[in-house]
Image: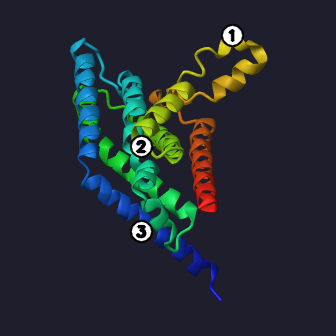
Amino acid sequence: MSTLPGSIARHWFGTWAVSRRELYAYLVSPMAYAVASVFLLVNGFIFFLILAQGFAEANLKAILPTTAFLLLLVIPVLTMRLVAEERSSGTIELLMTFPLTDAQVVVGKFLATLITYVLMLVPTLAYVLIIVIYGATEWGPIMSAYIGLLLLGGAFISLGLFASSLTRNQIVAAIVGIGLLLMLWVLGSGASVLGPRLSPIVGYLSLAEHFQNFGLGVLEVKDVVYYLSVMVGCLFLTTRVLESGRWRA
């Protein structure tokens, strides 16, 4: 009879096995390096343009909207292969023969992509160094900005993973992922035309609305809960998609 700690350990061992497999795939993938390079080059160029315009105090708030929009475009390219490639190559059937649950597969892929994303953000700490040199050392906004980027990235990854589970074509997965993210990003922009009752509800569903406070150094529970809810919800939906595929098989 297995104990609860033993069951939890086996569950996370299986999850981490999937994560290691996906991390290795990212490390040997030219696409991952290309995506990271494009993100860092474009974001870095825009950051230095902002500095060149003569800001009295450099701060992350000025670059955050650009960073978020770039992530909206590049993260679906990172996630497009997660399930779609498994389907097209036929390895999804092999993966399903392993002693793993669908939830372990989904969470493992999510964690691997999240780790890859964090590694992609590490070079942006150079921005912090520049901000310190400029003398604008307000650590509250800096820390909240990176917490916001971590939560936003997690939400983007979970949505991209869900999009990848819907098709066997990686390009279609990327397009669907970007489309879903764009829809949720601009959702709050036209919320005011829906009237006083629906406007707050639709505005709350916007990915962009919850990201604004992080650049101001404000950490609100509702924003953290929102992004965590998006992650959990999308991972749950992805698991159900895989379960339905296993049932059909």
Instruction: Find numbered disc 2 in the image and state the secondary structure of the residue it sits on.
Output: loop
Front position among marks 1 and 3 = 3
Q: Work out whether mark 1 precedes mark 2 in sequence or the reverse, and give the earlier one.
A: 2
Q: Work out whether mark 1 precedes mark 3 in sequence or the reverse, and give the earlier one.
A: 3
Residue that label 2 marks = 80
Instruction: Find numbered disc 1 in the image and state the secondary structure of the residue it sits on.
Output: helix
* Residue 144 seen in this snapshot: no
Please give the name of the residue rendered at 42% of the width and 51% of the height, measured from the top-left corner: 88
Q: Residues within 10 Å of mark 3 (few under 14, many from 20)?
A: some
Whether tag 2 and tag 3 are in contact, CB under 8 A, the answer is no
- Tell me: residue 215, above or below residue 22: above
Whether tag 1 and tag 2 are in contact, CB under 8 A, the answer is no
Amino acid type assigned to the residue bearing label 1 in the image: Val
Amino acid type assigned to the residue bearing label 2 in the image: Met
Q: Nearer the viewer, residue 34 or 41?
A: 34
Measured in 3D between alpha carbons, the distance from the residue under mark 1 to the one under mark 3, in whole angstroms, is 48 Å
Q: Quadrant of residue 234?
A: top right
Residue that label 3 marks = 17
Measured in 3D between alpha carbons, the distance from the residue under mark 2 to the one under mark 3, in whole angstroms, is 20 Å
Please give the name of the residue rendered at 23% of the width and 37% of the height, measured from the top-left corner: 37
Q: Nearer the viewer, residue 132 or 170?
A: 170
Amino acid type assigned to the residue bearing label 3 in the image: Ala
* Residue 76 seen in this snapshot: yes
Please give the name of the residue rendered at 53% of the width and 70% of the height, measured from the top-left corner: 100
Residue that label 1 marks = 193
Front position among marks 2 and 3 = 2
Residue 222 location, x and y as percent? 63, 36
- Tell me: residue 149, above or below residue 203: below
Measured in 3D between alpha carbons, the distance from the residue under mark 1 to the one under mark 2, in whole angstroms, is 34 Å
